[in-house]
Image (cartoon, helix red, strand yellow):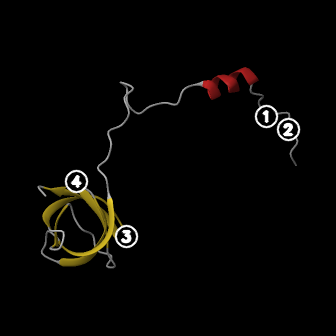
């Protein structure tokens, strides 16, 4: 069951060692660390999204930062590219770009909040 098949290639130990000792790659050519994302506050706030065609969709804000938020909703409704979000207790009354969207959740980037 665990016997080596003679047709399997043999990898030299020196090659495995060289790969293991190689430094981890970075996504940035200049070697600097990635920019820090704004701190997110977890929460549970009910809000109202207004879609481009005027339909209103009740949502729950699950987390919020200085430049965006994640919302969840029960209706399977495509949001479009731009929405308006309103939650008076924060206070939040802003347009937002839809950055990502899955069934029942979306990430929004706030504009001029």
Task: Give coordinates of residue 15: x percent, y percent.
Answer: 69, 22
Please tell me the numbered disc located at residue 8.
1
Q: Position of residue 20 (x, y in %)?
A: 64, 28
Q: Which mark lies nearer to you, 3 or 4?
A: 4
- Real-space CA distance between mark 2 and mark 4, rounded to the nearest whole angstrom: 55 Å
Local crowd at mark 1 within 10 Å, few (<14), some, or many (≥20)?
few
Q: Which residue is mark 3?
A: 103
- Marks 3,2: beta carbons within 8 A: no
Instruction: Identify the residue at horizontal 18%, vertical 60% (top origin).
Output: 96
Q: Position of residue 111 (x, y in %)?
A: 14, 56
Q: Is residue 63 above or below residue 112?
A: below
**Which tag, 1 or 3, sits closer to the chain's start?**
1
- Please tell me which of labels 3 and 4 falls first in the chain: 4
32 relative position to 68: left or right: right
Q: Nearer the viewer, mark 1 or mark 3?
A: 3
Q: Which residue is mark 2?
A: 4
| Disc 4 crowd, CA 10 A, few/some/many (<14, 14-19, 20+) | some
Marks 3/2: CA–CA distance:
46 Å
Tell me: residue 41, above or below residue 5: below
Label 3: which secondary element:
loop
Residue hosting label 4: 67
Whether 5 is drawn above or below 43: the answer is: above
> Which disc, if any, is residue 27?
none
Task: Tell me the CA gap for discs 2 and 1.
Answer: 7 Å
Q: Secondary structure at mark 1?
A: loop
Residues at marks 2 and 1 touching, judged by CB atoms closer than 8 Å: yes
């Amino acid at each position: 069951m665990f016997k080596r098949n003679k047709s399997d290639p043999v990898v030299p130990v020196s090659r495995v060692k060289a790969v293991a000792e190689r430094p981890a790659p970075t996504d940035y050519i200049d070697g600097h660390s990635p920019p820090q994302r704004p701190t997110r506050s977890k929460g549970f706030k009910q809000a109202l999204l207004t879609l481009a065609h005027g339909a209103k969709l009740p949502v729950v804000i699950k987390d919020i930062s200085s430049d965006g938020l994640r919302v969840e909703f029960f209706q399977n409704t495509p949001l479009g590219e731009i929405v308006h979000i309103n939650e008076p207790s924060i206070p939040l009354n802003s347009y937002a770009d839809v950055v990502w969207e899955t069934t029942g959740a979306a990430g929004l980037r706030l504009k001029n909040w």
